[in-house]
Amino acid sequence: MIGEARPVTQIEETSRPATRGTHWPWLVAVAGFVALVGAAGFRSAPGVLIDPLHEEFGWSRGTISAAVSINLLLYGLISPFAAALMERFGMRRVVASALVLVSAGSGLTVFMTASWQLLLCWGVLVGVGTGSMALAFVATITSRWFVKHRGLVSGVLTAAGAAGQLVFLPIIASLAGSHGWRSASLTVAVAALVVVPIVLLFLRDQPSDVGTTAYGATEDIPPPPPNRGAARRALRVLGDAARTRTFWLLAGGFAICGASTNGLISTHFVPAAHDHGMPHTTAAGLLALVGIFDVAGTIASGWLTDRVDPRWLLGGYYFLRGLSLLLLPQLFAPTTEPPMWAFIVFYGLDWVATVPPTVALCRERFGMTGPIVFGWVFASHQVGAAIAAFGAGFARDHLGSYDLTWYVAGGLCAIAAYLSVRIRSSGVVGAS
């Protein structure tokens, strides 16, 4: 009896940690989602605050858009280095530090008296902070913690940016309208700090840290050795990837993706709609609706990425986005008519649906360096966004209208569709 009881007890003891361990991938994903929502808060503010800052300080829209451009550019350029830093110091330290930086940058804006301070706080501090939690963070989580459902989890985490826009944009618009833009900035600063304890409690670097394996893995995959040269590794990975045609096709398409979303719609949709007589709060509400449908579209895209060739998904997403942008100038009006509702629904579904297939292509073509490669591809996304953010503001100052920018963006999306379907069909790439 006693001899028979011992094996049972041993089995029970060894099985319980494994059972508990299966929850850790989902806890890590939830912590990552909440962190990404917090990081998205201040990035949703520029489109709402352009006019209030212009009215209070007299700064041109081009000057304010330059701060947005710096933010977007750093958001992308920091991403591959952040992925390498996460290999060196761990996700938890990097993400917690980044949230504190976002809070400091957004909070310090209330003391601004000169445009260079806008460039420093809104551009540099928030750009570096949010860039440390850019989509390379998504790629890192899914690569380390998931084997099964990677595409779906990528879609859910990518949708966190849309969720942040959905949560914060109406609040920022309302606070800016009723209490001034400073109240909106302080709200975002506090929200970023609130997320820090969640990250410290639930974000873990490797499955082995909590005695489990990646979700869906059949065996324990040992973590890579600590990387003590994060910057060198990021640049070395870039050098290797840049020798392939696949990298440039992905980077070119994603640059256009950034120009047509973060750079153009996110930054300039509200002032463009206001030019046609629409109230700021109404236009901000429409962008919030984009966030609602973005969540659904990105999760659906992740599900499709597990089942459909990612190249054709990207091609379809970019082509349809281009058509919608060509129609947009005719849809603006003082009130929201059914065609504008249709545009908002479609653009929401398409907004970051491009991310899961792009992450999948980086992982499939570049193997273990996929997250860092995606960081560089995402950097190109933000270069495109920065150019579009400044260019659209410059065009508005000199042409008195945003119309030309919508047409140019629509044509570029057609080019992005072509680049996507030109990517090689399968296999880890070597030199082109």
Image (cartoon, rainbow, N blue to C red):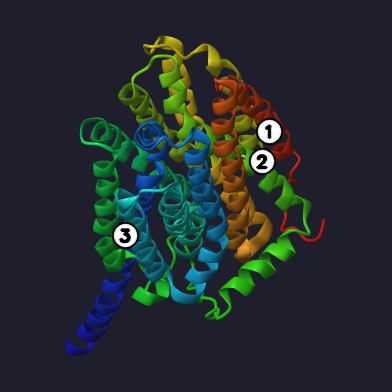
- Tell which circle, 3 or 2, labels the residue nearer the N-terminal end: 3
Give SS at disc 2.
Answer: helix
Residue 355 lies, in percent from the top left, at 54, 44
Query: What's the residue type where badge 1 is placed?
Result: Ala
Q: Which residue is mark 3?
A: 27
Q: Residue sitting at 46 percent across and 51 percent down?
A: 116
Q: Eyeballing the image, is 63 above or below 205?
A: above
**Label 1: which secondary element:** helix
**Quadrant of image for the N terminus:** bottom left
Can you name the residue that lies furthest to the left here?
1
| Nearer to us: label 1 or label 3 | 1
Asked if the residue at tag 2 contacts the one at tag 1, i.e. Cβ–Cβ closer than 8 Å, the answer is yes
Residue at image coords 50%, 70%: 85
**Element carrying mark 3:** helix
Q: Are marks 1 and 3 in contact (CB under 8 Å)?
A: no
269 vs 24, left or right, is right
